[in-house]
Amino acid sequence: MLTRTLTHSLQVSGIRAASALLVLVTATEGPGRAAVALRPAVSQTLAFEHATVVPMDRERVLHDQTVLVVDGRIAAVASSAEVAVPSGAERIDGRGKFMMPGLADMHVHLWDQRTLMLFVANGVTTVRNMWGAPRHLTWRREIASGERLGPTIYTTGPLIDGTPPIWNTSVVVETPEEAERVVADQKRAGYDFVKVYSMLSREAYAALFAAAGRHGIKVVGHVPAAAGLDAALDAKQASIEHLTGYFEATQTASSPLIGASDRRLLRQLPAYVDEGRFSTVATATARAGVWNSVTLVVAQKFVPSTEAATLLARPEMRFVPPRLRAGWDPTKDFRMRDRTARDWELQRRGDTLRNALVSSLHRAHARILLGTDTPNPFVAPGFSIHEELRNLVAAGLTPYEAIRAGTRDAAEFLDGLADFGTVEPGRRADLLLVDGNPLDDVANVARLAGVMIRGRWLPAAELQRMLNELADSYSRRTASFAAMPAFPGDGAEFYAEYDASFEGIPDGAERVVLKKLPDGRRLLAAQAISEPLNEATVSLRLVLDTTGRVETLQLNRNWPDGQATLDISKGDPRLQPGVIGSPMVATQLLLSERLKGLTVGGHLRLQRSDLELGNAVNLLDATVDVERAPDATADVAGRSVPVRVYTLDTRRNNASFRSTLRLDGSGWPASFETEQQSGNLTYRRVR
């Protein structure tokens, strides 16, 4: 009966189901004869009845439709009067509601796995992650297999920049050989795109395109200042993010910023943009076939500190992980903390210019993608997609065109039109049921009656329950050493425990031991646990010779999605400086002996090997400039004690950090604070 009903419904819809939906079963019945039957891949069937469908294949609505979903795929879309719903199917009443495809946010950063739920709850069923790491490949696989709830993930590899990189821990590329290696590695790992960034040289940028062509992977990202928009259009960069390169390309002839690359100077660009040139660059963009993910919302949310409290008070902010919210402080973010009143005036003028530029791109029929650049400051994951839809309409797109930028057009860009982006048989069942016609007003997209993601139906009440549970979980601290291996704390020369916090938000814990070995050498061991939800654990063991130099290093980093290890033996050239640095407080003990003779105001420069603790573990050459600051007092395990204070400026090829180290009277770390690019990470001794 099920087979006959599905066959009938497909016939009346006039569209054939995708082969992935149904399984052909053949069995021999007598010599040379084969019987062919259709059976569903799974028995679960859902029917959305009497809904108005907004298929997004073109600008139209289909009234009183029934949409059948089997095994996570759309099996049929047809008039409700003509569809016989299979017995046993789950029925969802769609009367008075509109069914449309799920949205794609085409520019996101997935820093915290808990934000996956925020996308789903807002109808975002596909994302393009724009700074990838191995964990994103794992999440992508788990979501596709149904092990994890979240939007379908497309992802770039790690960000590729020049010298000096804008973001710490970027991959720096300066030569054709480096470009070839990086692109080959990212393609081999399984990333979907290569992302280029602002500080690349023109030569490195060209080399990356050449390597990407050889390896069959598309290039997306910023337009480097040294290359310019013409080079990006000539190279046919697949997508340009945030309209980078356009203001530079449309400066007045008298602009003093022509050729500038310093990001502080470029804040002044809105004062020198000639809007009359927008139509020319828009036409060139359309001719080149280059897409733009314009992300208007992210620039709008760059605001002075006086406006931060109002934005943080918005109701959706309680669902954003506290660690992310803590980084949204304009007084700490390196992109905003030193802006003047004039800078903020020009930022707002830039908003107006970006709207006008999007209008020009639209009139020229250049391709536009819906994206938000979440979770940049005050751009809440998932929720911000609805702001950006309104932004696109304000910039001149019709509601249909704005929604298409995050449905059918997104699927086209991702070579996924056969899989998602429209409400048609054979497509993945990523669907939204909304209380209002989205083609009348894009605000209706946010009026969700429910979300179907990969065939799983989540009504509005269930989505709200999941959101509330997520918000409640943020108040529960979960870091614990209980699940970690035994720690060599007995007979210690020094033992301490530290709490870590980011801008006052708990961020983990670390315990450290230093003990003598029978042969006179010493063992420095540490274990660290990162919040939230025991996301990562690190075990570090260093053997020091009798002078305090590092002889051997063993490190193991575990997180829910994988493991990375490093095991370096005595004599390895990477240990030649004798000092190891890391984001962990334990390695700061290695500085203690070297800083003893430094008086207040004194300076010292050290060569050091620094551990980079990402999904992969690297050991990088670094230079550290140390200055002893005036002595102070600090709280150590509940007691106020005198401390020596040192500032550390660390530089390596892909990052720079400024830190403050406080040592107690015995030379042991009392606290260690690192200025990150959006706030401070602080370790304080609690035991």
Image: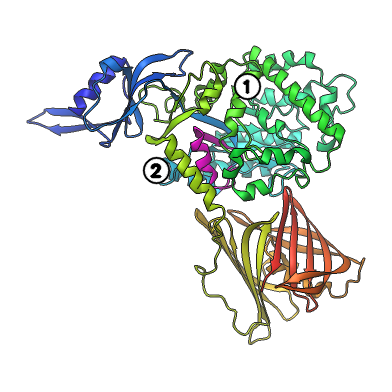
Inspect the magenta stretch and tell me whether residue 371 lies in it. Answer: no
Between marks 1 and 2 in the image, the one whose residue lies nearer the viewer: 1
On-image quarter of the C terminus: bottom right
At 69% from the left and 40% from the top, the residue drawn is 176
Secondary element at image label 1: helix
Identify the residue at horizontal 65%, vertical 19% (top origin).
Answer: 394
- Residue range in magenta is 110-133
Q: CA distance from mark 1 to mark 2?
A: 34 Å
What residue did someone put label 2 on?
145
- The correct choice, above or below, for 551 with respect to 143 in the image is below
Q: Is residue 294 left or right of residue 640?
A: left
Amino acid at pointer 1: Leu
Name the residue nearer the viewer: 675 or 189.
675
User: In the rendering, which numbered label is found on residue 452?
Assistant: none
SS type, badge 2: helix
Q: Name the outermost residue toward the bottom.
A: 518
Instruction: Judge by depth and name the residue closer to the eye, 96 or 135.
Output: 96
Q: Position of residue 505 (x, y in %)?
A: 65, 55
Q: Is residue 289 above or below residue 635?
A: above
Residue 608: quarter of image: bottom right
Image quarter of the N terminus: top left
Residue 353 visible within the image: yes
Residue for badge 1: 392
Q: Nearer the viewer, residue 431 or 315?
A: 315
> Would residue 209 appear left or right of 67 to someone viewing this image?
right
Is 641 or 630 nearer to us in this picture? 641
In primary-sequence order, the first of circles 1 and 2 is: 2
Residue 20 in the image: x percent, y percent?
33, 31
